Image (spheres, helix red, strand yellow):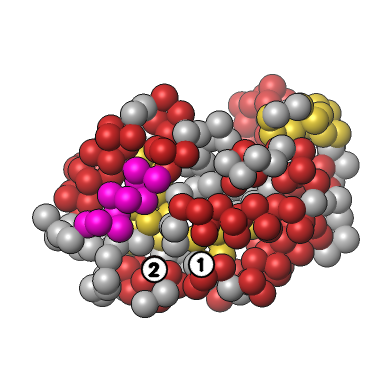
Amino acid sequence: MDAVERIRRTVAFERCDRPPVVAQVFAHAAVALGRTMEDYLTSAAVAADCQISAQGHYGYDAVFAVLDLTLEAEALGGEVQSRRGLYPAISKAPFGPGAAFDRLAIPDPTTAGRMPMLLEMARTLRRAGCGGAAVVGLVQGPMTLAVQLVGMEPALCLAADEPERFVQLLDYAAAVSRAFGLALPRYAALGADIGNFDYCVDPEPLLRALEGSRLCLDGNVKPLAFVTAEPDEVERDTERLLRTFDQRGGFIVSSGCEIPPEAREANVRAMVRATLGWSGA
């Protein structure tokens, strides 16, 4: 059974050979292989090669067509600050709070900024096959993108003082994210079948709240644990999650959010090892 079939069966609450394990590895794929973040963030070929190599190195069930979280705002004219060894950040928002958000153009993902580079990365991963691993894309949520488009303080002021215009800003941000997402291979065929929950969410109350739901869940090993914890701690946390969801099914072992680039390899291996060795509670 390959990873895509394993994930499909899990989403459908069907039994499979083992629970899927998806380490949310983005730029850590470069760091773990001795490449720099700058290499990863500026070349579709390098980024794809790092993802393919990291998946083979760790043995998890998905690769990520992800660079960084500034692509959409940069494509709209935002200025990006590069930071050595760190992800870039938006240093100047593309719009002021007085912009006519309901009349702004949607960028073309095939030509705008570095969006085409990410699409090429996704195509390369799909062509490579990645040992049957799933290829996962990511786009900004409307709230995050809205803040990047005008800046944090102006966005908060709009929300408080001009809520109607803030809704227009959110609608525009959602349209940009939707256009970018639909350009990713096969993304249009996907529905909201998987819900990711971060480490701060207690899985027990979540299970009670979702009683009777067929929503597949994905999470929630603490991302910082991959940097600061010992491998046996990560392994125990992973096994605790597997026990919690063993009867319900519909669960994909993952980090709660992105695994930091500086993560310890032994800790990523610990999460994967615990899942591959799981035979049920």
Per the rendering, the mark at residue 205 is none
Where residue 202 sits: x, y (%)?
26, 37
> The disc labelled 2 sits on which kind of residue?
Ile
Q: Main secondary structure of the magenta part?
A: helix
Q: Nearer the viewer, residue 48 or 188?
A: 48
Residue of label 2? 7
Answer yes or no: is residue 62 visible.
Answer: yes
Residue interval drawn in magenta: 269-278
**On screen, residue 165 above or below 280:** above
Image quarter in which the C terminus is found = bottom left
Q: Residue at x 68, y 29 (%)?
A: 86
* Image side of residue 92 versus residue 190, left or right: right
Q: Earlier in the sequence, mark 2 or mark 1?
A: 2
Quick one: label 1, few (<14), some, or many (20+) residues within 10 Å? many
Quadrant of image for the N terminus: bottom left
Contact, CB < 8 Å: mark 2 with mark 1?
yes
- Residue 264 in the image: state x and y as whole percent: 47, 34
Residue 179 seen from this side: no
Relative to 77, residue 276 above or below? below
The residue at the point 25 percent across, 56 percent down is 277
Q: Which residue is mark 1?
A: 134
Amino acid type of the residue tagged 1 in the rendering: Ala
In the image, is residue 272 part of the stretch drawn in magenta?
Answer: yes
